[in-house]
Image (cartoon, grey):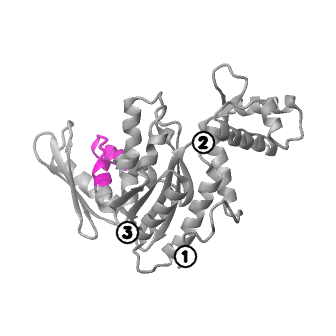
Amino acid sequence: MLTSRQEKVLALIIEQFNETNEPVGSKSLLQHSDLNVSSATIRNDMANLEKAGYLRKIHTSSGRAPSITGYRYYINQLIELSQDRTSNKFEEDVFDDMIHDNSQQPMKKAQLASQLMSSMTGFTTFVLGQNDVTHYFETFRLVKVDSNRFMGILITQDGDVGNQLFTITVPLEYDALQTINELINRELEGLTLSESYQRMKLTIPLIIQRAVGYQLDFSKLFEKIMIQLKGHDYFVSGKEHIYQLINPSMTPAGMSTLMTLIDGSSKTYQLISQTNDGIDVLFGYDLSPNILDGVNLLTGTYYDTHHRITLGVIGPLTMGHTDVILLLDQAIDKLTDK
């Protein structure tokens, strides 16, 4: 738990580092702040912040730079405070004309907001729209194809059907198959696909082991049909700004990974879909550790009709987080204003 002064020191270091991209020392910090303490006190706070993982040393410099953990803490604090702030450098009615056009579909409105945010911030922005309809489990059946291959068949209450071929090397006779089918259908009765997937991943394999002597995992079938039914639309604005995130030390693999943020990938969709409602923060480190460490994604998620819509801004760790967070907040307020 950080003290209030340590929180302020961390925030000041991050804000100064964002401006200069240079390690921050205690003397420089005091010169550019209203902290009324000694240089020795600041050095002690910086040492404690480094020990706790919020700051890091760069080479042999006596100054400090924020770590991913430090940035995460700082941005989460900003997110908590964003609702209490009433203004930023952007006009408060910037989205009004566009959002209040009721002839536009929810995703179209979000795309227009994304284009506007890209123009205002100079960063790449995106919209991920996902179908938010809840699907329920109906029936599962495991059918033998040949000596060690089995077809898993999953049917939802809406009649959607998915199948997956499984290779099972342990012997499964007719009675064992019947037992597996009966217990899975019994255990998952009345559950949503999401709940069913969690049970298939965590508890059902153990229940199967107790029943037939072998631990079997059929969760990939549930994951597959969940992805198929969920569906998504991905829209990117300001693609040209992504090149600002390429640095001389970035490898070809790193550049390729960065480009997936524009073109989309299942990993990108999965990570974005797991963001919290409202304003949230993702780091390039979460997508690809040690490759996209200098990349930051700020997201704003809300619901409209049967869609879960996420607006996102892709920029460097040194972006002006306060203004971007407030802009996302403002966009969501307007987009959800009925």
Residue 37 lies left or right of residue 155; in this view the side is right
Q: Amino acid at mark 3?
A: Val
Q: Nearer the viewer, mark 3 or mark 1?
A: 1
Categorize mark 1 by other alpha carbons within 10 Å: few (<14), some (14-19), many (20+): few
Left or right, 184 with reference to 301: left
Q: Are marks 1 and 2 in contact (CB under 8 Å)?
A: no
CA distance for labels 1 and 2: 31 Å
- Residue under numbered circle 1: 337
- Say whether disc 2 or disc 3 marks the residue closer to the N-terminus: 3
Numbered tag placed on residue 253 in the rendering: none
Mark toward the viewer: 1 or 2: 2
Q: Position of residue 308 (x, y in %)?
A: 44, 65
- Total residue callouts: 3
Residue 207 on the magenta span: yes
- Tell me what residue is drawn at x 63 percent, y 66 percent: 91
Pick whichever, 15 or 196, lies toward us: 15
| Main SS, magenta residues | helix
Residue 327, compared with residue 250, is above or below; it is below
Residue 226, horizontal then vertical, whole percent: 32, 58
The disc placed on residue 133 is 3
On-image quarter of the N terminus: top right
Q: Secondary structure at mark 2?
A: loop
